[in-house]
Amino acid sequence: MLARREIVMGKAEIKTKATEAGVADFILALPDARRRDEATVIDAMHERVTGQKARMWGPSIIGYGSYDYVYDSGHSGTMCRAGFSPRKAAMTLYLMGHYLDRQPEADALLAKLGKHKTGKSCLYVNKLADVDLEVLEQLVALSWEVMNERYPV
């Protein structure tokens, strides 16, 4: 998962951090009724899969759990293990981008998912009605498992 950063005295500082903002308030404030309903569905899905309560990460990411990372460059930080953002253009789910040695399993699920787009660690869905929610939940679960394998608690 990539997060926005700002440069502070020559050092990159991550801007996407856990906050005390209310998840329910954030969802209720979404301007589009369909996006509010979809965010509620995706939130419940993540809570089922992760066993974690949602937290806001930055102003627009709803995240579950956390992990600490260190890049080869030495840059380090903390980010949510799983999460999503109900953006205007598409529901964005943050999934483990390469699933380590489980990529064939992820590819098979993506082939059955329905209408979607992918990025490095993002899954973009315009409308939840366009995808199979059971398959989506399996993808979220697979990503959660891989994150727990890669970054043990």
Image (cartoon, helix red, strand yellow):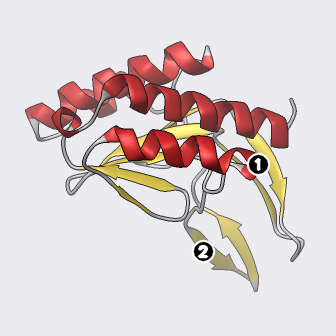
Res. 103 in view: yes
Q: Say the numbered circle drawn on residue 6.
A: 2
- Judging depth in this view, the residue of 31 and 113 nearest the camera is 113
State the separation of the CA atoms marked 1 and 2: 33 Å
Mark 1 crowdedness (10 Å alpha carbons): few <14, some 14-19, many ≥20: few
> As shown in the figure, which amino acid type bears the numbered disc 2?
Glu
Mark toward the start of the polypeptide (1 vs 2): 2
Q: Quadrant for residue 137, please give it.
A: top left
Res. 20 in view: no
Q: Say the numbered circle drawn on residue 45.
A: none
Q: Say the numbered circle drawn on residue 101.
A: 1
Mark 2 crowdedness (10 Å alpha carbons): few <14, some 14-19, many ≥20: few
Give percent across and percent down for residue 110.
43, 45
> For the point 73% across and 38% down, which residue is it?
146
In the picture, the quarter occupied by the N terminus is: bottom right
Viewed as shown, does residue 152 lie left or right of 54? right
Q: In the rendered view, would you say 9 is above or below 132?
A: below
> As shown in the figure, which amino acid type bears the numbered disc 1?
Asp
Q: Residue furthest bottom?
A: 10
Give percent across and percent down for residue 73.
86, 77
Give percent across and percent down for residue 45.
43, 20
Q: Secondary structure at mark 1?
A: helix
Viewed as shown, does residue 8 lie left or right of 107? right
Q: Secondary structure at mark 2?
A: strand
